[in-house]
Amino acid sequence: MYLSIPIIICVLFAGVQQSRGTEISVPCSGAEKSGFEKQSTWDASCSQVCQYACGSTKETLSNCTTPVTPATCTGTNTCSNTTGCTCPAQITVTTTFEQAVVKTLDCFNTSIKIILDKCVLNYFGIKLGDLFLGTPSDLTKVQLAAATPNATCRGITSYENGPSYVLDYTFAEKDSCNAIIEQTTTELIFKTAIHGLSGGSGSGSAVDRTSVFRLNFQCTYQRNYTKTPRGFLTPTCAANETFANGTCISSAYFQIQLPLVTRVFDPQLNDRTSALYAAYTTEAEKIARALFMGINMPPLQIVILGFKNGSVIIDFAVELKVNPLTPPMDVQMSLSRYIVAIMNNQMSSSDPNVALLMQYSFGPVSVGKITAGQTEILSKNPCYTKLDTCHTKAICKAISVTEYVCTCTGGYVDVLPSNPGHVCHSPCDATNKGYCLNNGICVIEPISGSPRCLCQAEYMGVTCQNLKANEPIRRLLEILPWVAAAILLIFFGLAIVLYCRRRAYMKKTFAKTAFMPDTRPSNSDAVVGLMRHSEQRTVLE
């Protein structure tokens, strides 16, 4: 059976921190046959593993000479404190053998990678030493006996995707693993097979061996590859291209810093998740594209790396379709001359690029060689290499080598806001006006062509006609704080009114009292009365 596998450009593996818990040391047992066995050290949860040569001193995770790789030991697999990640004793295969064994088959630009289920193969008696890549036809007795542990055509044990056997073949090797390579005027087809054998030691003994299974597959390439005399593939580069990293390169990478002198830096530009950062990124991409289109260096891709203080300095990386050996100074001089000409009104504003750039004031532009990390962002940009999962009606913007954001565009409506830009539907036309009630958004289902309503959070139903059952309670709970606040405000207002009335009454009462005549005797009247009383006593005496 032949499998047609789509081309995928790159696979990225995330780094994993090393475990500090109890480690499990698993010595060689010979289970994978001679030449393929490895000792291993696991962490307590079987989430990391260090594999090293048999017979060597035990290596800890913190001092592993080979890379510590992440491990997955889930499902029916178990994590033992003596054997690490182990397969179940019984396995039930409910699909075809091919579907049960093959986890992934990937065709890359210069290599192929096959990941097989170790547990299923072990259950049927197949070990790592029994597997190899070879001709997509039955093997002769001589070929069976001569099957050796050639590292090019053989595999390794891996636990990154659960217990697995991985066969990873690079075309630029000395051996094509007896593959069949067919070339047409437009395509090159690489045909090979995974062979599973039984018998022998696995290292190529003369003992008769039997072919247990053969899984054929092929990789089809649209670009121009050439079959070399040794049998492997190499891309045929054009005169203006350079062969590097296993592929033909016809472009160059640069890092640009462009000041917008009339802008004031906002601290929100340090936050990649902020709305301001998103708005500036969109604007910066338009500016950068217009600049390079103006100097006749169309950018293949632009990645905004960030914004720096000092007015606002746009820091971005760009890939240009120019000679890979183009000096950064040549690009800087071309940009500088173009910017000066625009600022001096020497360029026609009828050119849309000039019209856009005339809205800004620029400082001195700086162009330099791009760093290794930024080259990775560009060369493995998921948007550029088409590894993103954005909808066809969405725009992809790369944030890093593995991160990107999708945004529905062209008037299309995002019907899955929890995963933006992955499901974009066409909006309804005038014929469906009023189909959705209560501010529901009308979209057209791409398959049926029927209208569909995206309801507001509180409504449900085909046309958003029904209030959700708990919505009255939710709305009541929403307005209760406002009702309480209103009551408090009224009470406070009444208190102020009463206080003011009381104060006015007291003031009025005090004013009346102040102007009434005082009929009470004063102190001087009392003294005179006392003197008269004394005089009367004197006369009587």
Image (tube, grey):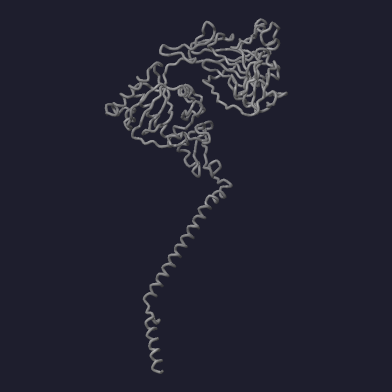
The C terminus, quarter of image: bottom left
393 above or below 487?
above
Q: Position of residue 288 (x, y in %)?
A: 38, 27
Q: Which of the 4 image quadrants contains residue 3?
A: top right
447 above or below 204?
below
Residue with the most extreme right position: 89
| 233 with respect to 251 (left or right) | right
Q: Position of residue 227 (x, y in %)?
A: 51, 8
| 502 with respect to 472 (left or right) | left
Question: Who's the residue at 42% across and 16% down the image?
Answer: 250
Q: Which of the 4 image quadrants contains residue 303?
A: top left
Question: Who's the residue at 67% across and 22% down the image?
Answer: 25
165 above or below 312?
above
Q: Position of residue 420 (x, y in %)?
A: 50, 34
Question: Who's the residue at 48% across and 26% down the image?
Answer: 383
The N terminus, quarter of image: top right
Q: Position of residue 68 (x, y in %)?
A: 59, 22
